[in-house]
Image: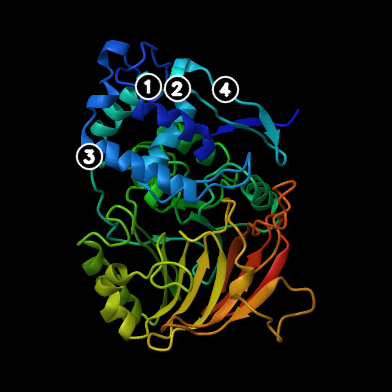
Amino acid sequence: MPPHTAIANYRSVSAAFEALAHQGRASTTRPGPGLESFAATDAPDPAAIAPEFRARLSQALAALEKQQHAEGVLASAQDPVASLMQSFLVENPPGGIVKGNPILTGPVAMTEVKYDEHDILGWIGSFFTWWRKIRPQSWLGPPPVPDSIGDGESMRVGLVSDWGTGLYGAPAIAASITADPKPFDMLLHLGDVYYSGTKDEAQHNFLDAWPKRPEALQRTLNGNHEMYTGGDGYFNVMLPAFKQGSSCCAIANNHWLLLGLDSAYVDHELTPDQQPWVNQLVAQAKAAGKKVLLFSHHQPYSLLDSQGPNLVAPLSSVLATGQIHAWYWGHEHRCVVYDAHPTWGVLGRCIGHGGYPAYRDTEVVGPWPQAPVGAPWKRFESKNLVPGGIMLDARNPYIKGEEEKYGANGYVTLVFDGPHLTEEMRNPDGTIILSQAIA
C-alpha cells in the first residue's frame, strides 16, 4: 500500500463555514488533540468572534478558492490565516477524526479532508484562540564569521526550494541527492514548509524527508510559510536539528562567498542588521578577490510575480558594485534562468519548484531556438525592466492523472572549481536538464 497523508483544500471547509452565517452558538463538540485543544466552554461563540478575525477569515477563504487545485492535489495560498487554518484542520480536526476518502494521485494516497456544519462551529473557536496567541520567535542575528566548507578550492552544493511538502517530486529529490555518488559539501533549502511551518510539519514534511548526507553542512533559510506560525517549527525544530544558529548563513572558501539571507522574518524584506552584515562580508570578499552569491526565499524581481523593492533597497550599494555574481531564490513555484541583469550584472535564478504542485506557465513563454533537441526549456524576453531568460516548461509525472497540467519539480547542484562555477538544473530523478558554466 502507498503511504498516506491528509491535505486540507478549499473544498474541505468552504461549505462548512457557510454555517457561520446561519448559526449563532458554537457546537458542543470538543476539539481533538493537536496543536492546541480546548473544551467547548473555552471556545468563543463564532457569532461574537472579533470582526477583524471574521474579515481575515473571509479573506483567507477567498485566497484558498483562488488557489484551488484538482481534487486530491495540495494547494496553499500566500495568506497567513488560510495556511494556519489548513495546518489546524489536518493536525487538530474537529472531533479528533480526519474524514474523507483516500485519492491516489501518485505514490502517496491523499485524503482531502471534509467537514460539515456539525463539526466546524466549536472548532473555529479553538482555531481563533490559537491564532490570537501566535507571536514571532526571537530574532537570531547573522553569523559574524562564515563557515568554511570543502578543501578551499572546490566544493559541491545541493540546492532546493519550496520543497517542504513531503509530496510529489520532493521525495524523489531527496532520494536522488541521498543516492548521488559524488560527495556534497553543503545542502541548502531556500524556505517554505507547508502549510504554515508548525512543529509537526517541520518534523514530518521537512526533517523526516530531508536527504541523508552526513558529510554535508546542512542549512535552511526562512520562508513566509514558516513565519505564519511565528517561525515556531523553523526556529525551534529545524534550526536546532541542523545545528544552525541563525536564519542567515555565510559560507566561504578561497574563491567564493555564499550568503543566505532571511527575507521572511519581515515579509519580503531584510531585518535592519542584515544590511551592515552583508556590506561587511562583501567588502571582505572583494578585498580577498572572491566572488559572491546571494540566496534568499523571496525574489528581488520577477517576470510573473511581485517585485522586491524592499528586499533590494538595502542591498543597492553592493549590487551597484557588480560584486554579486548570482542570486538564487524560491517563493515562486517555477524554475527560471534569467539573463544577466542589465544594471547589476547579476545572474538571477528562481528555483522554487522543489515540491509544490504549480500550474504550468506555457502561455507566457515561446520557443528557444538554441535549446538542445528535446530540452524542456522555453524562452521569454525582457519586459517591464525584468531581464529575459528561459523557463522550465515540462509536465509533472508525480501527479497522476494531471501530469500535463502541473509543472515539473526539480533541484540544482552547484559545482565550484577554484574561481569557476557550473550550475546543473536537475529533474527529481537526478537527470541533468541544463548544465552551464556561469563563472
Q: CA distance from mark 1 to mark 3?
A: 18 Å
Question: Mark 1 sits on what residue?
Answer: 121
Q: CA distance from mark 1 to mark 2?
A: 7 Å
Q: Is residue 299 left or right of residue 38?
A: right
Q: Is residue 273 left or right of residue 331?
A: left
For the N terminus, which image quadrant? top right
Nearest to N terminus: mark 1 or mark 3: 3
Q: Secondary structure at mark 3?
A: helix
Q: CA distance from mark 4 to mark 3?
A: 30 Å
Dot 1 alpha-carbon crowd within 10 angstroms: few under 14, some 14 to 19, many 20 or more:
many
Q: Hey, what amino acid is under mark 4?
A: Lys
For the C terminus, which image quadrant? bottom right
Dot 3 alpha-carbon crowd within 10 angstroms: few under 14, some 14 to 19, many 20 or more:
few
- Residue 117: give its label: 2
Residue 160, by quadrant, is bottom right
Q: Hey, what amino acid is under mark 1?
A: Leu
Q: Hey, what amino acid is under mark 3?
A: Glu
Judged by depth in the image, the label closer to the viewer, 3 or 2, is 2
Identify whether 74 is placed above or below 269.
above
